[in-house]
Amino acid sequence: MIWATFLMALREIRRNAMRSILTMLGIVIGVAAVITMTIIGEGATQSVKNDISALGDNMLIVSPGFSRRGPPSGGSKSFDEADVKAIQKQISGIAAMAPAANRSATVVYGNTNYTTQVTGTTEGFFQTRGYKVAEGRLLNDVDVRLGLAVCVIGETVRKNLLEGVDPIGVALRVGKMTCTVVGVLESKGSSAMGSDQDDLLVLPLRQFQRRMAGNRDIPTIYISVASNRSTTSVKERIESLLRERRNIRPPAEDDFNVRDMAEIAQTVSSATGALTALLGAIAAVSLVVGGIGIMNIMLVSVTERTREIGIRVAIGALGSEVMLQFLTEAVVLSTLGGIIGILFGAGMGFGITSLMKLPFVPAPGIMIISFVFSAFVGVAFGYLPARKAAQLKPIDALRHE
Protein backbone atom coordinates (compact mmCIF):
# COMPACT_ATOMS: atom_id res chain seq x y z
CA MET A 1 0.00 0.00 0.00
CA ILE A 2 2.86 2.38 0.81
CA TRP A 3 4.39 1.84 -2.63
CA ALA A 4 1.00 2.50 -4.29
CA THR A 5 0.62 5.66 -2.18
CA PHE A 6 4.09 6.77 -3.20
CA LEU A 7 3.29 6.27 -6.90
CA MET A 8 0.04 8.18 -6.43
CA ALA A 9 1.95 11.05 -4.81
CA LEU A 10 4.39 11.17 -7.73
CA ARG A 11 1.44 11.19 -10.16
CA GLU A 12 -0.15 14.14 -8.36
CA ILE A 13 3.16 16.04 -8.30
CA ARG A 14 3.66 15.42 -12.02
CA ARG A 15 0.09 16.51 -12.77
CA ASN A 16 0.80 19.94 -11.21
CA ALA A 17 4.45 20.11 -12.20
CA MET A 18 4.89 23.89 -12.16
CA ARG A 19 3.14 24.29 -8.81
CA SER A 20 5.21 21.44 -7.37
CA ILE A 21 8.44 23.03 -8.55
CA LEU A 22 7.49 26.38 -7.03
CA THR A 23 6.51 24.62 -3.79
CA MET A 24 9.86 22.84 -3.61
CA LEU A 25 11.78 26.03 -4.30
CA GLY A 26 11.82 27.09 -0.65
CA ILE A 27 13.29 23.74 0.43
CA VAL A 28 15.78 23.77 -2.46
CA ILE A 29 17.03 27.25 -1.53
CA GLY A 30 17.16 26.40 2.17
CA VAL A 31 19.12 23.17 1.76
CA ALA A 32 21.39 24.68 -0.92
CA ALA A 33 22.17 27.63 1.38
CA VAL A 34 23.07 25.33 4.28
CA ILE A 35 25.27 23.10 2.11
CA THR A 36 27.00 26.04 0.40
CA MET A 37 27.70 27.86 3.68
CA THR A 38 29.03 24.68 5.27
CA ILE A 39 31.32 23.86 2.34
CA ILE A 40 32.74 27.39 2.27
CA GLY A 41 33.24 27.37 6.05
CA GLU A 42 34.89 23.94 6.01
CA GLY A 43 37.08 25.02 3.10
CA ALA A 44 38.20 28.16 4.94
CA THR A 45 38.95 26.14 8.07
CA GLN A 46 40.93 23.58 6.09
CA SER A 47 42.83 26.33 4.30
CA VAL A 48 43.89 27.91 7.59
CA LYS A 49 44.91 24.51 8.96
CA ASN A 50 46.96 23.80 5.85
CA ASP A 51 48.70 27.17 6.04
CA ILE A 52 49.52 26.75 9.72
CA SER A 53 50.72 23.19 9.09
CA ALA A 54 52.94 24.57 6.30
CA LEU A 55 54.43 26.97 8.84
CA GLY A 56 54.86 24.06 11.22
CA ASP A 57 52.06 23.12 13.63
CA ASN A 58 54.69 22.09 16.21
CA MET A 59 56.43 25.46 15.97
CA LEU A 60 56.90 28.05 18.70
CA ILE A 61 57.64 31.69 17.85
CA VAL A 62 59.42 33.67 20.55
CA SER A 63 59.36 37.45 20.25
CA PRO A 64 59.79 40.43 22.59
CA GLY A 65 56.81 42.56 23.64
CA PHE A 66 53.90 42.58 26.08
CA SER A 67 50.62 40.84 25.20
CA ARG A 68 48.35 42.58 27.70
CA ARG A 69 45.70 43.26 25.07
CA GLY A 70 45.37 41.98 21.55
CA PRO A 71 48.46 41.04 19.53
CA PRO A 72 51.96 41.19 21.00
CA SER A 73 53.23 44.75 21.37
CA GLY A 74 56.76 46.06 21.00
CA GLY A 75 58.81 48.14 23.39
CA SER A 76 60.78 45.35 25.05
CA LYS A 77 64.43 44.54 24.54
CA SER A 78 65.30 42.01 21.89
CA PHE A 79 66.96 38.69 22.55
CA ASP A 80 70.68 38.04 22.04
CA GLU A 81 72.90 35.10 21.21
CA ALA A 82 73.20 34.21 24.90
CA ASP A 83 69.42 33.73 25.09
CA VAL A 84 69.51 31.49 22.03
CA LYS A 85 72.35 29.38 23.44
CA ALA A 86 70.60 29.12 26.83
CA ILE A 87 67.45 27.77 25.18
CA GLN A 88 69.49 25.33 23.09
CA LYS A 89 71.37 23.99 26.12
CA GLN A 90 68.71 23.99 28.82
CA ILE A 91 65.47 23.09 27.01
CA SER A 92 65.03 19.53 25.80
CA GLY A 93 62.58 18.43 23.12
CA ILE A 94 63.69 20.99 20.51
CA ALA A 95 64.14 19.55 17.02
CA ALA A 96 65.47 22.77 15.45
CA MET A 97 65.64 26.46 16.21
CA ALA A 98 66.60 29.60 14.35
CA PRO A 99 67.18 33.14 15.59
CA ALA A 100 66.06 35.62 12.94
CA ALA A 101 66.05 39.32 12.14
CA ASN A 102 64.16 40.94 9.26
CA ARG A 103 64.38 44.14 7.29
CA SER A 104 62.86 45.36 4.07
CA ALA A 105 65.54 46.18 1.50
CA THR A 106 65.96 46.86 -2.20
CA VAL A 107 67.84 44.15 -4.06
CA VAL A 108 69.62 45.10 -7.29
CA TYR A 109 70.72 42.93 -10.21
CA GLY A 110 72.08 44.79 -13.26
CA ASN A 111 69.51 47.47 -14.11
CA THR A 112 66.70 45.71 -12.25
CA ASN A 113 65.82 46.34 -8.63
CA TYR A 114 63.18 44.81 -6.39
CA THR A 115 62.20 45.48 -2.78
CA THR A 116 61.79 42.39 -0.63
CA GLN A 117 62.01 41.11 2.92
CA VAL A 118 65.59 40.26 3.90
CA THR A 119 65.95 37.72 6.72
CA GLY A 120 69.18 37.13 8.61
CA THR A 121 69.10 33.73 10.26
CA THR A 122 70.78 30.36 10.68
CA GLU A 123 70.49 27.03 8.85
CA GLY A 124 67.68 25.89 11.21
CA PHE A 125 65.36 28.54 9.69
CA PHE A 126 64.44 26.32 6.74
CA GLN A 127 63.43 23.38 8.92
CA THR A 128 61.43 25.41 11.41
CA ARG A 129 59.57 27.32 8.68
CA GLY A 130 59.12 24.32 6.37
CA TYR A 131 61.12 25.70 3.41
CA LYS A 132 62.72 23.30 0.92
CA VAL A 133 65.28 23.99 -1.75
CA ALA A 134 64.26 23.97 -5.43
CA GLU A 135 67.66 24.81 -6.97
CA GLY A 136 71.19 24.95 -5.54
CA ARG A 137 71.47 24.55 -1.78
CA LEU A 138 70.36 26.02 1.53
CA LEU A 139 72.57 27.93 3.97
CA ASN A 140 74.85 25.60 5.91
CA ASP A 141 76.79 25.73 9.17
CA VAL A 142 79.93 27.16 7.49
CA ASP A 143 77.97 30.02 5.87
CA VAL A 144 76.39 30.91 9.21
CA ARG A 145 79.47 30.47 11.41
CA LEU A 146 81.74 32.54 9.15
CA GLY A 147 79.02 35.01 8.13
CA LEU A 148 79.70 34.53 4.42
CA ALA A 149 78.15 36.83 1.82
CA VAL A 150 75.81 34.21 0.36
CA CYS A 151 72.03 34.18 0.12
CA VAL A 152 69.02 32.01 -0.70
CA ILE A 153 66.09 33.62 -2.50
CA GLY A 154 62.38 32.88 -2.74
CA GLU A 155 60.52 32.19 -5.97
CA THR A 156 58.97 35.69 -6.09
CA VAL A 157 62.39 37.35 -5.89
CA ARG A 158 63.70 35.06 -8.63
CA LYS A 159 60.77 35.92 -10.94
CA ASN A 160 61.00 39.67 -10.38
CA LEU A 161 64.76 39.97 -10.47
CA LEU A 162 66.26 37.02 -12.30
CA GLU A 163 63.67 35.97 -14.87
CA GLY A 164 65.40 33.98 -17.62
CA VAL A 165 68.70 33.93 -15.74
CA ASP A 166 70.34 30.95 -14.02
CA PRO A 167 70.18 32.27 -10.46
CA ILE A 168 72.90 30.08 -8.91
CA GLY A 169 76.15 32.04 -8.58
CA VAL A 170 74.58 35.40 -9.45
CA ALA A 171 75.79 38.36 -7.35
CA LEU A 172 73.02 40.56 -5.95
CA ARG A 173 73.45 43.93 -4.30
CA VAL A 174 71.45 44.19 -1.08
CA GLY A 175 71.71 47.68 0.36
CA LYS A 176 75.44 48.36 0.72
CA MET A 177 76.53 44.73 0.54
CA THR A 178 76.78 42.09 -2.18
CA CYS A 179 75.77 38.45 -1.77
CA THR A 180 76.04 35.44 -4.04
CA VAL A 181 72.91 33.39 -4.64
CA VAL A 182 73.51 29.77 -3.63
CA GLY A 183 69.93 28.49 -3.74
CA VAL A 184 66.29 29.08 -4.66
CA LEU A 185 63.46 27.95 -2.36
CA GLU A 186 60.45 25.88 -3.39
CA SER A 187 57.33 28.01 -3.69
CA LYS A 188 55.02 28.03 -0.65
CA GLY A 189 52.43 30.50 -1.98
CA SER A 190 50.46 32.88 0.23
CA SER A 191 50.08 32.43 3.99
CA ALA A 192 46.78 32.30 5.91
CA MET A 193 47.14 36.06 6.42
CA GLY A 194 47.59 36.64 2.69
CA SER A 195 51.31 37.48 2.72
CA ASP A 196 53.58 36.09 0.00
CA GLN A 197 55.85 33.50 1.65
CA ASP A 198 58.08 33.37 -1.44
CA ASP A 199 58.94 37.07 -1.26
CA LEU A 200 62.15 36.83 0.79
CA LEU A 201 65.93 36.74 0.65
CA VAL A 202 67.76 34.81 3.37
CA LEU A 203 71.25 35.76 4.59
CA PRO A 204 73.48 34.27 7.30
CA LEU A 205 72.55 36.03 10.56
CA ARG A 206 76.08 37.27 11.25
CA GLN A 207 76.32 38.84 7.79
CA PHE A 208 72.92 40.49 8.26
CA GLN A 209 73.86 41.90 11.68
CA ARG A 210 77.23 43.18 10.47
CA ARG A 211 76.27 44.69 7.10
CA MET A 212 72.59 45.58 7.38
CA ALA A 213 71.31 45.85 10.97
CA GLY A 214 74.43 47.32 12.61
CA ASN A 215 73.59 45.55 15.88
CA ARG A 216 73.37 42.00 17.28
CA ASP A 217 69.72 42.09 18.32
CA ILE A 218 67.58 39.03 17.66
CA PRO A 219 63.89 40.03 17.39
CA THR A 220 62.53 36.54 16.69
CA ILE A 221 63.38 32.95 17.56
CA TYR A 222 61.69 30.13 15.64
CA ILE A 223 61.59 26.80 17.48
CA SER A 224 60.46 23.48 16.05
CA VAL A 225 59.44 21.08 18.83
CA ALA A 226 60.28 17.37 18.42
CA SER A 227 57.29 15.36 17.23
CA ASN A 228 57.26 13.19 20.39
CA ARG A 229 57.18 16.21 22.72
CA SER A 230 54.35 18.47 23.80
CA THR A 231 54.60 22.03 22.51
CA THR A 232 52.80 23.19 25.66
CA SER A 233 55.42 21.79 28.06
CA VAL A 234 58.32 23.10 25.92
CA LYS A 235 56.62 26.50 25.76
CA GLU A 236 56.23 26.62 29.57
CA ARG A 237 59.90 25.75 30.14
CA ILE A 238 61.04 28.41 27.66
CA GLU A 239 58.84 31.01 29.35
CA SER A 240 60.26 30.07 32.75
CA LEU A 241 63.84 30.25 31.45
CA LEU A 242 63.34 33.61 29.74
CA ARG A 243 61.65 35.11 32.81
CA GLU A 244 64.69 34.09 34.83
CA ARG A 245 67.16 35.45 32.26
CA ARG A 246 65.26 38.73 31.89
CA ASN A 247 64.92 39.03 35.69
CA ILE A 248 61.11 39.17 35.68
CA ARG A 249 59.67 38.50 39.13
CA PRO A 250 56.01 37.79 40.02
CA PRO A 251 53.56 39.46 39.67
CA ALA A 252 55.25 41.27 36.76
CA GLU A 253 54.04 40.04 33.40
CA ASP A 254 56.26 38.68 30.66
CA ASP A 255 57.87 41.23 28.35
CA PHE A 256 58.06 38.58 25.64
CA ASN A 257 55.69 36.18 23.89
CA VAL A 258 55.96 32.50 23.10
CA ARG A 259 53.27 31.74 20.52
CA ASP A 260 52.28 28.12 19.99
CA MET A 261 51.16 27.50 16.40
CA ALA A 262 49.17 24.42 17.51
CA GLU A 263 47.14 26.61 19.90
CA ILE A 264 46.66 29.23 17.19
CA ALA A 265 45.48 26.53 14.76
CA GLN A 266 43.01 25.21 17.36
CA THR A 267 41.71 28.72 18.10
CA VAL A 268 41.26 29.55 14.43
CA SER A 269 39.52 26.22 13.77
CA SER A 270 37.13 26.80 16.68
CA ALA A 271 36.35 30.33 15.50
CA THR A 272 35.70 29.35 11.89
CA GLY A 273 33.70 26.31 13.04
CA ALA A 274 31.46 28.49 15.20
CA LEU A 275 31.00 30.95 12.33
CA THR A 276 30.09 28.09 9.96
CA ALA A 277 27.53 26.76 12.44
CA LEU A 278 26.03 30.24 12.83
CA LEU A 279 25.75 30.75 9.06
CA GLY A 280 24.27 27.27 8.69
CA ALA A 281 21.68 28.00 11.39
CA ILE A 282 20.71 31.25 9.66
CA ALA A 283 20.39 29.43 6.33
CA ALA A 284 18.29 26.71 8.00
CA VAL A 285 15.61 29.31 8.74
CA SER A 286 14.77 29.30 5.03
CA LEU A 287 13.99 25.56 5.39
CA VAL A 288 11.21 26.48 7.82
CA VAL A 289 9.95 29.06 5.32
CA GLY A 290 9.99 26.33 2.66
CA GLY A 291 7.99 24.06 4.98
CA ILE A 292 5.35 26.75 5.44
CA GLY A 293 5.12 26.97 1.63
CA ILE A 294 4.51 23.21 1.43
CA MET A 295 1.79 23.40 4.08
CA ASN A 296 0.08 26.26 2.25
CA ILE A 297 0.06 24.44 -1.11
CA MET A 298 -1.10 21.18 0.48
CA LEU A 299 -4.04 23.01 2.13
CA VAL A 300 -4.95 24.41 -1.29
CA SER A 301 -4.64 20.92 -2.76
CA VAL A 302 -6.99 19.47 -0.12
CA THR A 303 -9.58 22.14 -0.93
CA GLU A 304 -9.28 21.50 -4.69
CA ARG A 305 -9.60 17.72 -4.28
CA THR A 306 -12.39 17.68 -1.71
CA ARG A 307 -14.85 15.87 -4.04
CA GLU A 308 -12.12 13.32 -4.93
CA ILE A 309 -11.56 12.68 -1.23
CA GLY A 310 -15.33 12.33 -0.68
CA ILE A 311 -15.59 9.72 -3.46
CA ARG A 312 -12.65 7.73 -2.06
CA VAL A 313 -14.12 7.68 1.43
CA ALA A 314 -17.60 6.87 0.08
CA ILE A 315 -16.31 3.73 -1.69
CA GLY A 316 -14.53 2.49 1.44
CA ALA A 317 -11.21 4.32 1.87
CA LEU A 318 -10.22 4.81 5.50
CA GLY A 319 -9.36 8.22 6.95
CA SER A 320 -5.84 6.94 7.76
CA GLU A 321 -5.33 6.03 4.08
CA VAL A 322 -6.36 9.54 2.96
CA MET A 323 -4.05 11.02 5.57
CA LEU A 324 -1.18 8.81 4.45
CA GLN A 325 -1.70 9.87 0.82
CA PHE A 326 -1.46 13.62 1.54
CA LEU A 327 1.35 13.17 4.04
CA THR A 328 3.30 11.15 1.45
CA GLU A 329 2.83 13.91 -1.14
CA ALA A 330 4.23 16.48 1.32
CA VAL A 331 7.22 14.29 2.24
CA VAL A 332 7.97 13.49 -1.42
CA LEU A 333 7.88 17.21 -2.26
CA SER A 334 10.21 18.12 0.60
CA THR A 335 12.68 15.26 0.06
CA LEU A 336 12.85 15.92 -3.68
CA GLY A 337 13.55 19.55 -2.81
CA GLY A 338 16.21 18.37 -0.35
CA ILE A 339 17.97 16.21 -2.94
CA ILE A 340 17.93 18.99 -5.55
CA GLY A 341 19.12 21.45 -2.88
CA ILE A 342 22.04 19.18 -1.90
CA LEU A 343 23.15 18.84 -5.53
CA PHE A 344 22.73 22.57 -6.17
CA GLY A 345 24.47 23.51 -2.91
CA ALA A 346 27.40 21.16 -3.62
CA GLY A 347 27.76 22.70 -7.08
CA MET A 348 27.62 26.23 -5.67
CA GLY A 349 30.10 25.30 -2.95
CA PHE A 350 32.50 23.82 -5.48
CA GLY A 351 32.26 26.90 -7.71
CA ILE A 352 32.75 29.42 -4.90
CA THR A 353 35.62 27.54 -3.23
CA SER A 354 37.29 27.24 -6.63
CA LEU A 355 36.98 31.00 -7.18
CA MET A 356 38.26 31.71 -3.66
CA LYS A 357 41.03 29.11 -4.10
CA LEU A 358 39.88 27.20 -1.02
CA PRO A 359 39.93 23.41 -0.57
CA PHE A 360 36.62 21.73 -1.51
CA VAL A 361 35.38 19.82 1.57
CA PRO A 362 32.04 18.11 0.72
CA ALA A 363 30.94 17.62 4.38
CA PRO A 364 28.79 14.47 3.80
CA GLY A 365 27.51 14.56 7.38
CA ILE A 366 25.84 17.94 6.79
CA MET A 367 24.35 16.66 3.52
CA ILE A 368 22.75 13.68 5.30
CA ILE A 369 21.45 15.93 8.09
CA SER A 370 20.01 18.36 5.50
CA PHE A 371 18.24 15.51 3.70
CA VAL A 372 16.76 14.11 6.93
CA PHE A 373 15.73 17.59 8.05
CA SER A 374 14.01 18.30 4.72
CA ALA A 375 12.04 15.02 5.11
CA PHE A 376 11.13 16.06 8.65
CA VAL A 377 9.90 19.42 7.32
CA GLY A 378 7.59 17.50 4.95
CA VAL A 379 6.16 15.45 7.84
CA ALA A 380 5.83 18.42 10.20
CA PHE A 381 4.23 20.85 7.74
CA GLY A 382 2.27 18.21 5.80
CA TYR A 383 0.54 16.82 8.88
CA LEU A 384 -2.07 19.58 9.24
CA PRO A 385 -3.34 19.43 5.60
CA ALA A 386 -3.31 15.59 5.71
CA ARG A 387 -5.30 15.59 8.96
CA LYS A 388 -7.79 18.05 7.49
CA ALA A 389 -8.28 15.76 4.46
CA ALA A 390 -8.66 12.67 6.67
CA GLN A 391 -11.38 14.33 8.81
CA LEU A 392 -13.62 15.30 5.86
CA LYS A 393 -17.10 13.76 6.01
CA PRO A 394 -18.13 11.99 2.75
CA ILE A 395 -21.49 13.81 2.46
CA ASP A 396 -19.90 17.26 2.97
CA ALA A 397 -17.06 16.41 0.61
CA LEU A 398 -19.40 15.21 -2.16
CA ARG A 399 -21.50 18.37 -1.82
CA HIS A 400 -18.41 20.57 -2.15
CA GLU A 401 -18.35 22.69 -5.34
Image (cartoon, grey):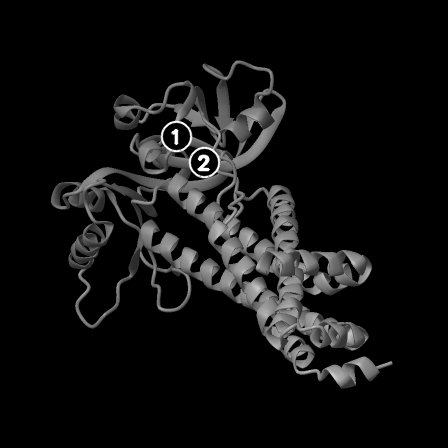
| Position in image of residue 399 (x %, y %) | 83, 83
Numbered label tally:
2
Residue 388 located left or right of residue 308:
left
Q: Amino acid at mark 1?
A: Leu
Q: Give the secondary structure at mark 1.
A: strand
Which three-letter amino acid code belongs to the residue tagged 2? Val
For disc 2, the neighbor class at 10 Å (few under 14, some 14 to 19, many from 20) is: many
Q: CB under 8 Å between callouts 2 and 1?
A: yes
With respect to residue 65, does 348 lie above or below? above
- Can residue 218 be seen by looking at this rendering? no
Sequence-earlier tag: 2 or 1: 2
Real-space Cα separation, disc 2 to disc 1, in angstroms: 7 Å
**In the foreground, 275 or 160:** 275
* Quadrant position of the N terminus in the picture: bottom right
Numbered badge on residue 203: 1
Residue 44 lies, in percent from the top left, at 51, 50
Q: Which residue is mark 2?
A: 118
